[in-house]
Image: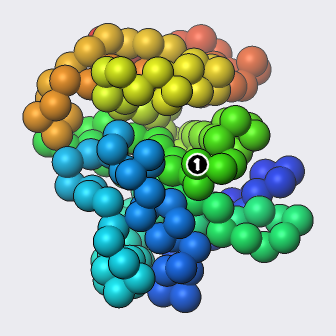
Amino acid sequence: MNVLSTNRLTLRPWLVEDASAALEVYGDAAVTRWLSPEMDQVPDATAMKLLLQQWIAESARLAAPAGRWAIERKDDGQVIGGALLLPLPPGQEDLEVGWQLRPDLWGHGYASETTHALAAWAFRHDVYEVFAVVRPGNTRASSTVRKNGMHWVGETSKYFGLDLEVFRLRVADIDPAAPASAGPPARD
């Protein structure tokens, strides 16, 4: 799995040794209340280690560009969150871009850096669009994905069996040199 880099961040594979830092994210109800039904609040370090082992194994099985990454700040080496680029259920046709950060670090632009790094990575692998799915009422996430340049596509219940807002980012949205018709037709 590749290491991705931004001005301030390194997105790298998770390590079991990251459990303590990961628990600061995935053990926080403010973060996990908005995640998919498959992701509950992690109760303790032992559970976090087991989950990291699952994520590490999952990432090893996935074909690029898909995967899960730890988000590490370059200036101090701290793991501040997690990122993902995963096929969405049920058809595994759409690729979801996502991130989770420690709540004390919300509002510092790390989500935007992460989103653009993952999108650029996906676009280098002949993916023409990535999606973010947001639970209704999660105004912080909706605002963040819009600031990231993602466009609202609509609402659906096809992912995870939940009513979700769907946002999309295409190659042409972040690369002005890309032809507007790059990639397959839109699936609205």
The answer to whether one can see residue 126 in this image is: yes
Residue 108 higher or lower than 51, as above or below? above
The image shows residue 142 at horizontal and vertical percentages of: 48, 22
The kind of residue tagged 1 is Pro
Q: What residue do we see at 35% from left, 86% from top?
A: 46
Which one is in front, 72 or 140? 140
The residue located at (41%, 64%) in the rendering is 27
Circle 1 sits in a helix, a strand or a loop, which is it?
helix
* Front position in the image: 187 or 118: 118
Residue 75 shown left or right of residue 31 in the figure: right
In the rendered view, would you say 128 is above or below 147? below
Q: Please rate how many residues cluster around mark 1, counting C-alpha atoms within 10 Å: few if below 14, some from 14 to 19, many from 20.
A: some
Q: In which quarter of the image is residue 102?
A: bottom right
Which residue, given by chain and number where applicable, does mark 1 sit on?
103
Q: State which quarter of the image contains the N terminus.
A: bottom right
Quadrant of residue 59 within the rendered picture: bottom left
User: Where is residue 162 drawn, in percent x and y?
Assistant: 16, 31
- Residue 132: give x, y in percent of width and height: 42, 32
Q: Residue at left 19%, top 24%?
A: 163
Q: In this view, does 87 lie to the left or right of 99?
A: left
In the image, 108: left or right of 26? right
Judge from the rendering whether residue 134 lies leftward or rightward of residue 169; answer left or right: left
Decide: is 175 above or below 20: above
